[in-house]
Image (spheres, rainbow, N blue to C red):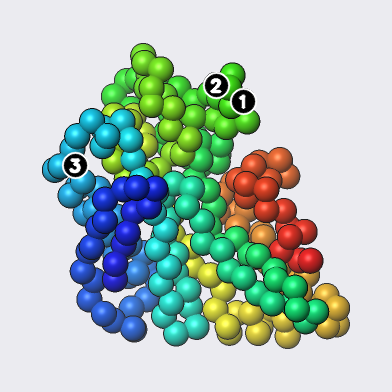
Amino acid sequence: MMLMPQNGGSRGDVHVEDNQNMSFPSWEGTFMRCFSEIDEKLAKNIDTDGFHGGSTSVSVLKQGDQVIIGNVGDSRAVLCRRAPDNHLIPIQLTVDLTPDIPSMRASSRTCLGEAMRIFAVEEDPTVNRVWMPKRDCPGLAMARAFRNFCLKDYGVASVPDIMDLLTNSEVINIVASAPKRSVAAKLLVNHAARAWKYKYGFKNQKEEWDALGGFSRANFES
């Protein structure tokens, strides 16, 4: 397994035993360990860029009929499907881990007795950023990242968000439960949306829209 930070970050290669029979909890632990090891390696070669700058990452693993994704920051995994009329349908598989996500705010508030600050600047009012408690830097637009060590003591972490997508069997069961073909797709989308909202704790449609970065559910269903 190879994990490669993006946005100009250093390349991190972490060996993982090739085991096609690993369960999701086992893979989840492996992702957590790999991301932690990458950040530790980057910390050993810390420089000015690494202290204030950072990198995002997204890793996709396919095991049989299961897809497991781990990401930090706002790099996205997007699945493209071709509709019967031949137009392409984008399906966003990850959530941008920005300071706006409720779970990110809850985990990024206070550390060592001091709270990081989260606010948008006048030049870019639509993007909330993370700032050090007493300094107007670095203005990180995400709550999880590799490097950015100046914020690691205040809640920003390299812990990946792990998504375990629906398996073929689950999809078949959901579709089979639909009374009509016309409602099967909507039933499947609603099932996934409920699980997604429960995972991230969105309270309203605006929070969901902001997290999707402009991908509406209409994009998924059209």
Residue 218 x %, y %:
77, 59
> Which residue is under mark 2?
121
Q: Is residue 208 visible?
A: no
Residue at the image point whose x is 26% and y is 56% from the top: 11
Residue at the spot of label 3: 43
Residues at badges 1 and 2 in contact (C-beta under 8 Å)?
yes
In depth, the one of 168 and 173 nearer the eye is 168
Q: Which circle marks residue 125 in the picture? A: 1
Badge 3: residue crowd in 10 Å (few <14, some 14–19, many ≥20): some
* Residue 24 placement, left or right of 171: left
Type of the residue with mark 1 = Pro
Query: How far is the residue under mark 2 from the one under mark 3?
Result: 29 Å
Front-most of 194 and 221?
221
Which numbered disc, 2 or 3, marks the residue that appears first in the sequence? 3
In the rendering, at what x and y percent does residue 47 appear?
Answer: 19, 34
Q: Are marks 2 and 3 in contact (CB under 8 Å)?
A: no
Give residue 193's mark: none
Residue at image position (75%, 73%) is 87
Quadrant location, the N terminus: bottom left
Tell me whether circle 1 and circle 3 mark residues in contact (CB < 8 Å): no
Residue type indicated by callout 3:
Ala
**Distance between the alpha carbons at the discs numbered 1 and 3:** 32 Å
Where does the image place residue 72, in percent across and percent down from the top left? 41, 50
x%, y% of residue 73? 44, 46
Element type where label 2 sits in the image: strand
